[in-house]
Image (tube, helix red, strand yellow):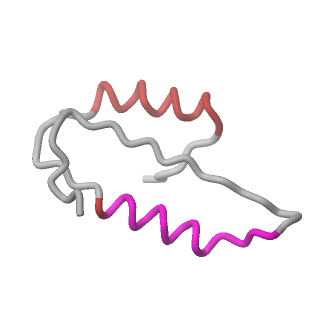
């Protein structure tokens, strides 16, 4: 599974697909996805001439169990 999507249209398409495939229930842990995105960004080859940015959108239905 590819954790990335391209542009706002990609975000909206991914969100719509997730609504039909995801059951929201606890416990809620974000540590792994935050670590994955952080590792991806640390490995990205960026410079003044080659700038990149990432947006991590997290939606939850309740308590986050690994807030620390």
> Would residue 38 be counted in the magenta stretch?
yes
Q: Position of residue 51 (x, y in %)?
A: 78, 59
Instruction: Determine the residue positioned at 19% across, 48% down.
Output: 64
- Of the 4 image quadrants, the one containing the C terminus is bottom left
For the point 19% across and 59% down, the residue is 66
The span picked out in magenta is: 32-47
Judging depth in this view, the residue of 25 and 3 nearest the camera is 25
Q: Indicate the quadrant where residue 6 lies.
A: top right
Q: Residue 22: image x %, image y %? A: 25, 34
Residue shown at the point (33%, 37%) measured from the top left: 59
| Quarter location, residue 48 | bottom right
Answer whether residue 55 is magenta in the image: no
Which x, y percent locates residue 17?
A: 40, 29
Residue at figure coordinates x 61%, y 28% from the top left: 9
Classify residue 23 by image quadrant.
top left
Above/below status of 31 relative to 8: below
Q: Nearest the camera: 63 or 20?
A: 63
Q: Tell me if residue 34 comes above or below residue 9 in the rendering.
A: below
């Amino acid at each position: 599974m590819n954790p990335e999507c391209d542009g706002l249209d990609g975000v909206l398409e991914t969100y719509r697909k997730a609504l039909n495939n995801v059951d929201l229930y606890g416990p809620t842990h974000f540590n792994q996805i935050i670590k994955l995105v952080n590792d991806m960004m640390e490995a990205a080859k960026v410079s003044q001439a080659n700038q990149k940015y990432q947006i991590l959108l997290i939606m939850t239905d309740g308590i986050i169990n690994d807030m620390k």
